[in-house]
Image (cartoon, rainbow, N blue to C red):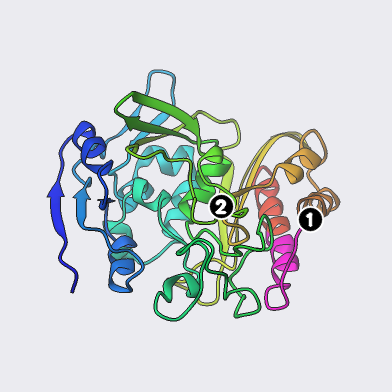
């Protein structure tokens, strides 16, 4: 066993200072990092426990909701303001993992969890550019049922596993990142990166930066929103595809829409093409089909996951139909 030191911090300043040191890794709920340590994928010398940072869920003066990065996923899903104002987020969290894991996992850690690609987790036997840059990708030509159909590269076809992050992408969430220079705020959509030729670089988090809060702005689509996840079994399975969507309607016309997809790319995939097709048009089956066709026009499925395109198309149509029908 590799010896590991442990420090628990109580302030963002201490987390920034210790997290920037070589061999130090930040530890939230540990539901992913500890698992990867057991498999030999992660081998930190020091764990810096940040679960004591803010876990408050508070309404800001402008009406946005600010969630401390150490808030447990279960607490976020159960919060009255999340359930009423942002139902897609509550449903996405409840669709992910088991109740025990949701009670441990933090929202900050959830955003930084690693892919569940089998070849990434097989440190002893598989080549993986995400784990060892330049080593190759055994997923190519391998078992690809769960792999990406959008935004992949010859270097990596892994998907991002988070359900919560898909809803946050649709909600235009903003991240508060603390460093020695202060706090910067940036859109979640800019946080996760597509693989390109450096799949080991998964986010734009700079060395020494720590996620300290997630901000949910007021939204005209959030209240009429939902999350649907399609998976291989009824519980505790990662998404084959998932859809987070919200609609704002005037009569039969869509005045605003937000859609994000999970299980299809290395990051929560914001469906901007589909939104553009739908915005300002009718809320009907024909429009939903045209939106899906536009979004998946550049999809590059593999032989084992070509089913994801029609599956995601049907799921998107079903979610939009449900949301548009709720107004009746």
Do callouts 1 and 2 mark residues in contact (Cβ within 8 Å)?
A: no
Q: Residue at x 44, y 49 (%)?
A: 90
Label 2: few (<14), some (14–19) or many (≥20) C-alpha neighbours in 10 Å? many
Is 75 placed left or right of 119 in the picture?
A: left
Is 265 placed left or right of 310 in the picture?
A: left
Q: Position of residue 57 (x, y in %)?
A: 31, 36
Residue tagged 1: 298
Q: Position of residue 319 (x, y in %)?
A: 66, 55
Q: Nearer the viewer, residue 1 or 11?
A: 1
Q: Is residue 29 above or below residue 125?
A: above
Q: Position of residue 251 (x, y in %)?
A: 76, 34
Is 175 placed left or right of 247 in the picture?
A: left
- How far is the residue under mark 1 from the one under mark 2? 16 Å
Which SS class for mark 2?
Answer: loop
Residue 170 is marked as none
Kindly give the residue lying farthest to the front in the view shown.
Answer: 134
Magenta region includes residue 213:
no
Q: Is residue 6 above or below residue 121?
A: above
Name the quadrant of the C terminus: top right
Residue tagged 2: 267
- Point out the stretch of residues depicted in magenta: 297-315
């Amino acid at each position: 066993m590799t010896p590991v030191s442990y420090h628990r911090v109580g302030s963002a300043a201490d987390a920034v200072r210790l997290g920037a040191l070589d061999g130090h890794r930040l530890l939230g709920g540990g539901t992913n990092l500890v698992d990867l340590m057991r498999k030999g994928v992660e081998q930190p010398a020091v764990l810096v426990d940040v679960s004591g940072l803010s876990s408050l869920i508070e309404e800001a003066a402008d009406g946005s909701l600010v969630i401390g990065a150490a808030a447990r996923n279960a607490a976020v899903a159960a919060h009255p303001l999340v359930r009423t104002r942002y139902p897609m987020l509550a449903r996405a969290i409840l669709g992910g993992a088991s109740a025990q894991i949701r009670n441990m996992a933090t929202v900050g850690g959830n955003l930084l969890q690693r892919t569940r690609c089998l070849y990434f987790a097989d440190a002893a036997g598989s080549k993986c550019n995400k784990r060892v840059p330049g080593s190759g990708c055994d997923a190519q030509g391998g078992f690809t049922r769960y792999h990406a159909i959008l935004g992949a590269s010859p270097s990596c076809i892994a998907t991002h596993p988070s359900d919560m992050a898909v809803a946050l992408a649709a909600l235009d969430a903003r991240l508060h990142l603390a460093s020695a220079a202060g706090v910067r705020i940036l859109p979640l959509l800019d946080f996760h990166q597509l693989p390109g030729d450096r799949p080991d670089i998964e986010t734009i988090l700079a060395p020494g930066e720590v996620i300290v809060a997630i901000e949910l702005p007021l939204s005209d689509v959030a209240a009429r929103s939902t999350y649907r996840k399609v998976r291989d079994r009824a519980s505790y399975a990662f998404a084959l595809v998932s859809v987070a969507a919200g609609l704002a309607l005037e009569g039969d016309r869509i005045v605003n829409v937000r859609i994000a997809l999970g299980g299809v790319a290395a990051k929560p995939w914001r469906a901007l093409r589909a939104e553009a097709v739908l915005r300002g048009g009718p809320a009907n089956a024909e429009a939903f089909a045209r939106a899906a066709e536009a979004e998946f026009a550049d999809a590059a499925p593999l032989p084992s996951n070509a089913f994801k395109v029609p599956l995601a198309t049907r799921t998107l149509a079903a979610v939009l139909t449900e949301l548009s029908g709720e107004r009746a």
